[in-house]
Image (cartoon, rainbow, N blue to C red):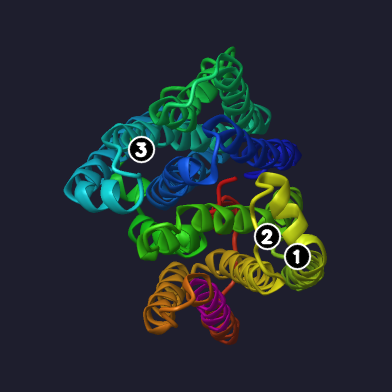
Amino acid sequence: MPVPEGTLSVALGLLVSGTSAYLFFKLVRVGMGSDAKAEPVLQLWFLMFLLAPGFFLPVEQEVGRALAHRRALGQGGAPVVRRAAMLAAALAALTTVGLLGASGVIVDKLLGGSWALLICLVVGVLGWASAHLGRGVLSGSGRFGPYGVLLASDGVLRVIAATVLIVIGSKTLIAYGLVAALPPAFALAIALRGQRPIVEPGPEAEWPELTQNLGWLVLGSVMAAVLVNAGPLAAGVLKHTGQKALVTHFTFAVVITRVPLFMFQAVQAALLPKLARLAAQGEFAEFRTGFRKLMAIVGVVGVLGVAGALTVGPFAVRLFSPEADLSRRTVGLLALASAAYMVALAIAQAVIALHGHAKVAAGWASGVAVFVIVTAIGSRSDLLLRVELGLVAGSIVADIAFAWALASLLRTGARPDAASVTEALFDMPLEP
């Protein structure tokens, strides 16, 4: 099967990676000594996880799909990997040039004036370029155990390194910036240990084999990553003098309200292989039933997430920073935005499974556009509220766009296949 049963390893890797991310945020706060000082490192984190999944997750998806197809035909995939490496390198160069071109604004508005953190950001993006390529090779080769190891070891390495910095008393921005940026490359090395040869020689690969939907996937992935990471970044850009600590508290709230989303992605990674199997066997009635069950889980997780945020959200944020004093309104709206985003992500994966890649890109782009508009016209006197309302509105608009796209595709008789569901399985633009 193109998607083997070992996908549970991906779920476990996501759980470890997500837990490690929360620990890292807490360690940055402790190590830097104050919320204001921690803010540039946290902004670096969100920038890195906007750019890396946005540009390189599509490479992972296409490599995984192409290798899975070749494996089903008994063909070696080494030529595909060589092509993909060239593609990843080109995207990495493009991203680096873009960062350098916008370096003044990024350093001034988000990175606390630290050019060293900009270097860390570039290093992190390049590391994730190689990691996503490696993840595509592992998934397409059916090696989900090492795939899960890569996810988990990235987070574990980061927590260990941050702990060491605290023990030795380091409070320098570049030290924590490197801890945020370097682990992906080391995690890839750990995951690939003992896995050679991963791919065998095979027929020469042409670009269409790897880039069938790459343009739409990149656009959709970038827009999805922008929407899910936009809150802290927008708050960082719009903040006034003296609001650094407030932005850090807001960032902690964003991370807390993502807990249900991370948990759902881990469960989803274990459930979607069944949908892939049903699609491959042409059992479309059962596929629809399975998808409806998946959406029911989304609804339950979303409701519980909002209820939990309203109940214990402010207390949970204070676990990160005792100085935080955010309202239930803030954590409640952020939880609502996260729940709406989770619904959008699930429906978008169904649309991809039905070959609606262009519709997914348009849906995420519409959500980002609405976020920008609502945030821009929001109250100047309440920094957090304008961002919160932008996130909620953007995610809901994405929900509507994807629901319409899914209904449209089903009316026209679109049908999933194993390759498209494989692609949808790894359409996870949210990294822990």
- In this image, 42 relative to 94: left or right? right
Magenta-colored span: 387-400
Work out whether residue 140 or residue 220 is closer to the camera in this orientation and state it: 220
**Classed neighbour count for the residue bearing mark 2: other residues with Cα under 10 Å, few (<14), some (14–19), many (≥20):** many
Residue assigned mark 3:
121
Callouts 1 and 2 close, C-beta under 8 Å: yes
Mark 3 closeness class: few <14, some 14–19, many ≥20 residues within 10 Å = many
Of marks 3 and 1, the one in the foreground: 1
Q: Locate residue 390, reporting x and y percent.
A: 49, 76
Work out which quarter of the rendered image holds the N terminus and state it. Answer: top right
> Circle 1 is placed at which residue position?
309
Q: Nearer the viewer, residue 208 or 350?
A: 350
Sequence order check: which comes first, mark 2 or mark 3?
3
Q: CA distance from mark 1 to mark 2?
A: 7 Å
Q: On the rendered structure, is 220 left or right of 410?
A: left
- Mark carried by residue 257: 2
Amino acid type of disc 2?
Thr
Q: Main secondary structure of the magenta part?
A: helix
Look at label 1 and name its amino acid.
Ala
Quarter of image, res 300: bottom right
